[in-house]
Amino acid sequence: MTHNIKEIDAKGYWRDVVKLTLSLLAIWFIVSYGAGILFRSVLDQVSIGGAPLGFWFAQNGSIYVFVGLIFYYCRAMNRLEKKYGVEA
Amino acid sequence: MGGEEFWTYFWVVLTFGTYIGIALWARAGSTDDFYVAGHDVHPTINGMATAADWMSAASFLSMAGLIAFMGYGGSVYLMGWTGGYVLLALLLAPFLREFGKFTVPDFVGDRYYSTTARLIAVVCALFVSFTYIAGQMKGVGVAFSGFLGVEFNTGIMVGMAIVFVYAVLGGMKGVTYTQVAQYVVLIFAYTVPAIFISLIVTGNPVPQLGFISNVKGEDISMLEKLNTVVTDLGFLEYTQTDKSMFDVFAITGALMFGTAGLPHVIIRFFTVSSAGAARVSAGWALVFIALLYTTAPAVASLARLNFIDTVNESTYIASDADYDTEAATIVAEGGKPIPAWFKSWEKIGLLEVTDKNGDGIVQYRAGADNEVTKLDRDIIVTANPSIAGLPAWVIGLVVAGGLAAALSTAAGLLMVISSSVSHDLCRRTFFKGMTDQQELLTARGAAAGAVILAGVMGMNTAKLGFVAQVVAFAFGLAAASLFPVIVLGIFWKRMNREGAIASMLTGLITTFWYIYHFKFVDTDSSHWWLGVSPEGIGFVFMFLSLAVGVVVALVTAPPPQDIQDLVEDIRVPGTRTPHGIADAEMLPE
């Protein structure tokens, strides 16, 4: 089978994609399972507005971060694609 | 009530008319149109359609109520049903779009060069979709019978007829554009009452901010006040839970990974034009979902506070008495009459009061002397506009919103069921010589059959009382059986046919067995393994399924070179070329 990835450094591109994906998933884990569940009781000692911080992350904060993560991913991927000459 | 009833009919008729109008406009002319809306839906439009597809009768009607009474424990739904979109955007959607076919079993069958793998994926997809759709049809029946006084079964038939028109005629194309309209209806119906209730309690019109604000005119935050109020009545603090941390972790995980593995959500990302568009579209989907999901915890806490405030220690008024005169007398005597909305939901049977101590006053408590003996959690959303004293035209909108949520999800599920039958079973497995036109006809037939079957299941949910229970199956199975093989298929080139089959079967059998056993055979929660509830077990078995898949793949032969090349192609956007084994029967697009 022939590839039309002659000029594209597919391996380098993929390595960067995986690296980006793992770092974003780390944040995803920290704001939900971390702040919202595992370290909730610690964070609850601080409050945001009138809500305990850990509780707020579990019910509102993590969702805002999720949205931000996906749009950041889109931008970072566009940059990567430009860098490696990939046409999405 | 006259005005409310008029507006309810008004909104239901108006929205249903719109859905049919869209259906007639967006008819499907080819299998490409029918399965993936021609691959040319705009990412933002698809995001909106995905949001409606995803948010079901449960999200719209039940979730805030569940959170209101579970407090912190309800967070599992909030994080679980949104966090899955991060996984979808980063791990699945763009690559599956680049793969370029119609269904989830298409990917499993072609990537793992195996009809067996395809068939197991079909079984998972069908099982997940049918358990889910019965609940939606039941929701439609409840909305009609509870609010419009139409008989339950008649309500389901009306709902079936509507879905029939746009799903059978329009396929994915019709479904996409009706879902957009349904999103607009449901988000409006959800947020308007929330804004008003937030204004009333906290003085802040943004529910997300009201959630963290002080109670209006008092120097105490709304949540602190709620904590005090509920603990005074003997309930657990609102910001705490009695679930174990591991169980909360596991349920959140099962819902997140399950969301990412649900076929009706995944196929929505096949309708956009490219991998890049699929990523952006997942972002928009989560924006539209987050609008409702960040409002829900505010609605939950505010409504709980309001409910206690208005109902507890109020003077009961008998149903045969004239409410208005009685209420006026009670107020004149310095008492607090039971609210009018309470009486109307009592009539429908969602609320019930037993005056245990015979003092004529309603005591709402935790424990044995509680006098609100029936409290259906769904009233939190449905009664919200009445509690906030909103005009009749807003109150009438809630039913249309609930119906929009139920119908849009039902339609998305129907697309999975019909394509599983016409595409995966007929075209790709048993009748490979089918023409496009024959397949389209079969797809319409399968959609029609599925609508009827779903309706019949919905009508029998009273007898099949387990429907609410089996939703755990849908997420557990999607997480443990579909998610691992799809992710491994993209991120691990070495993953092969044997590993995929072993992994799917492991996830399917263990999860099914655990949920079945602990929901129906042994309902004693102290016997749960590691204290994990059936709702959360899919998360645990997902790791087992991953491990089994990897080990089996390592001890068997690597996949053919063709397949490894295919995996490299789908990782890099714009490089997808046909590969013999995987694409011999159907070319990617």
Image: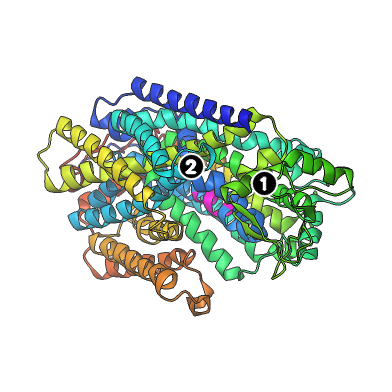
Whether residue B416 can be seen here: yes
Quadrant of the rendering where the C terminus of chain B is positioned: top left
Q: Relative to B221, is B418 above or below?
A: above
- Same chain check for tags 1 and 2: yes
Q: Nearer the viewer, residue B122 or B464?
A: B464
B226 or B453: which is nearer to us? Answer: B453
Q: Disc 2 sits on a residue from what chain? A: B
Location of residue A10 in the rendering, given as x and y in whole percent from the top left corner = 37, 44
**B183 part of magenta stretch:** no
Q: Residue at x 40, y 74 (%)?
A: B521
Residue type at mark 2 is Ser
In front of the other: B589 or B1: B1
Q: CA distance from mark 1 to mark 2?
A: 22 Å
Residue B145, labelled with which disc? 2
Q: Are marks 1 and 2 in contact (CB under 8 Å)?
A: no
* Residue B320, numbered circle: 1
* Residue B251 percent coordinates (x, y): 52, 62
Give the magenta range.
Answer: B78-84
- Who's the residue at 19% across and 47% down the image? B425
**Would residue B344 be found to the left or right of residue B545 on screen?**
right
Residue B103 appears at what percent x and percent y? 30, 43
- Residue B467 relative to residue A58: left or right: left
